Amino acid sequence: MNQQMEIICIGNELLIGKTLNTNAHWLAKHVTTFGIIVKRITVVSDDVGEIASTMREALKRKPRFIITIGGLGPTFDDKTLEGMAKALNRKLEVNEKALKMVREKYEAYFEEGKMEKVELTPARVKMATLPERAEPLPNPVGTAPGVIIKIEGTFLIALPGVPPEMEAIFKESVAPLLKKEAGGLTFFETSIYADGIMESALAPLIDKAMHDNPYIYIKSHPKGEERKPHIEIHFSTTAKNSNIARDRLGKAMVQLSELAQENGGKIRFKGKK
Amino acid sequence: MNQQMEIICIGNELLIGKTLNTNAHWLAKHVTTFGIIVKRITVVSDDVGEIASTMREALKRKPRFIITIGGLGPTFDDKTLEGMAKALNRKLEVNEKALKMVREKYEAYFEEGKMEKVELTPARVKMATLPERAEPLPNPVGTAPGVIIKIEGTFLIALPGVPPEMEAIFKESVAPLLKKEAGGLTFFETSIYADGIMESALAPLIDKAMHDNPYIYIKSHPKGEERKPHIEIHFSTTAKNSNIARDRLGKAMVQLSELAQENGGKIRFKGKK
């Protein structure tokens, strides 16, 4: 089963180093726990051509899911839907279902006394102007709906960049789809910490443990410096249930701990600050 | 002058949401201040094929600089140099200059009493095994050297993923090159904050200010929610000196502040928490 995903983040603020990309981190972490494999994260600018070509390249690699984050709001530089239409060679049209969602939001703001009158200005209608045959996803906490289109074997999903809105649409509309499609696999991970052994001395030991434990991925992350090594050793696996995962992870951890200790390393189960 | 850059981050830990990509953020922020335009950030896994195809795609877009981060260490899953050799159709070979750098590091560790003997194991020689005709960049704080290769009009630069090592090689060897190549342009930015005006009402005002100030980029970042709007308005420009930049930014800020106030917005020069 194809459980691959690509994430595309859209926004100049990410490319000028103004904003730290916590959205990609949050999304990658969540979908990974469902057994989805994130193959690539791409960050591009608020430019229709860049957005369209990035989407086309991702579609060619045929992942099961592409999730875009950002560029769905009312301002001129929110260009994700225009880029999507260009990538798919589809027209943009006012989507009646999306327009209803947007109108109801402004009616609610009006009733709360936050607006003097409900007015669907061009900037507001823009948020309901989707590529043909797209479906809007309700936004429980903001105005701009999310968007989903199925293109052959790929679900192309657009989420807004404001973190609480991205997270709310994901939880309400996207997570249930991913769980269904991922086929019940789950991601498990754990770490141990080695002191007193250099990463370059640990390297062949990790090689051996990976070879002997084919379903386990092991990666070392140096936390100190090479001359005073403190290394996190991260073990992960994707499995049908936690018993299988725990057995696999345990076996690999025990083997690598023994190998590291034979080579002068001290193993801890908690990292140092 | 072509001042474009692409950043390629390599590491499964970024794709499973284990590690927040602070390296890309740090690097993007620093190079932007030199007047460099980051066009794309791509995150891929520790896979030779993925690394090579990502590099090849980036090279085809002919940016002036490609900087990769991660995958230069001694373990089996540090595959950046192998991916680079594959992308460029070059052989990997032990680079004598790089090997000297690595050897001197281990000799220093030995002299400090951190190692029993200096031994250049295969895992350690790997850090000095570069694509043909590559140049190593000294690592002031760790073991793995950075790498630079000039490919036609593009500088392809590889930095390690451990943040202090990435930053130290960047400052010592990469920043001077970028400053020289960027031709003396610098990036300037500032923000104001608007309360009491919805982002959708601000949108056409930003449109007008962008139109009247062609060298200024303005982007709104909603910090509250649509019904209780608190919006950061970020102004940026790239200019030859700070006088030009200050004049441009000031003119655009005054115009947009007036427009926002005419439409019921309150302008502050500091954001709310």
Image (cartoon, coloured by chain):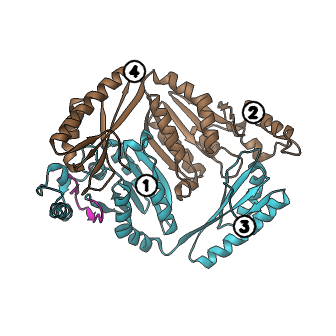
Chain colours: A brown, B cyan
Number of residues whose C-alpha sits closer than 10 Å to that of mark 3, classed few (under 14), some (14–19) or many (20 or more): many
Eye-nearest disc, 4 or 2: 4
Is A202 magenta? The answer is: no
Q: Can residue B44 be seen in this view?
A: yes
Number of residues whose C-alpha sits closer than 10 Å to that of mark 4, classed few (under 14), some (14–19) or many (20 or more): few
Q: How far apart are marks 1 and 3 (CA)?
A: 31 Å
Indicate the amino acid at tag 3: Met
Residue behind mark 3: B253
Locate residue B163: give its quadrant: bottom left
Residue B153, compared with residue B160, is above or below; it is below
Number of residues whose C-alpha sits closer than 10 Å to that of mark 2, classed few (under 14), some (14–19) or many (20 or more): many
Q: Are marks 2 and 3 in contact (CB under 8 Å)?
A: no
Indicate the amino acid at tag 1: Asn
Q: Are marks 1 and 3 in contact (CB under 8 Å)?
A: no
Q: How far apart are marks 4 and 2 (CA)?
A: 39 Å
Residue behind mark 2: A101
In which quadrant is the N terminus of chain A drawn? Answer: top left
Residue A241's label in the rendered image is: 4
**Picture mark count:** 4
Dot 2: what SS?
Answer: helix
Q: Which is more N-terminal, label 2 or label 4?
A: 2
Indicate the amino acid at tag 2: Met
Q: Distance between the residues labelled 2 and 3?
A: 33 Å
Mark 1 belongs to which subunit?
Answer: B
Dot 4: what SS?
Answer: loop
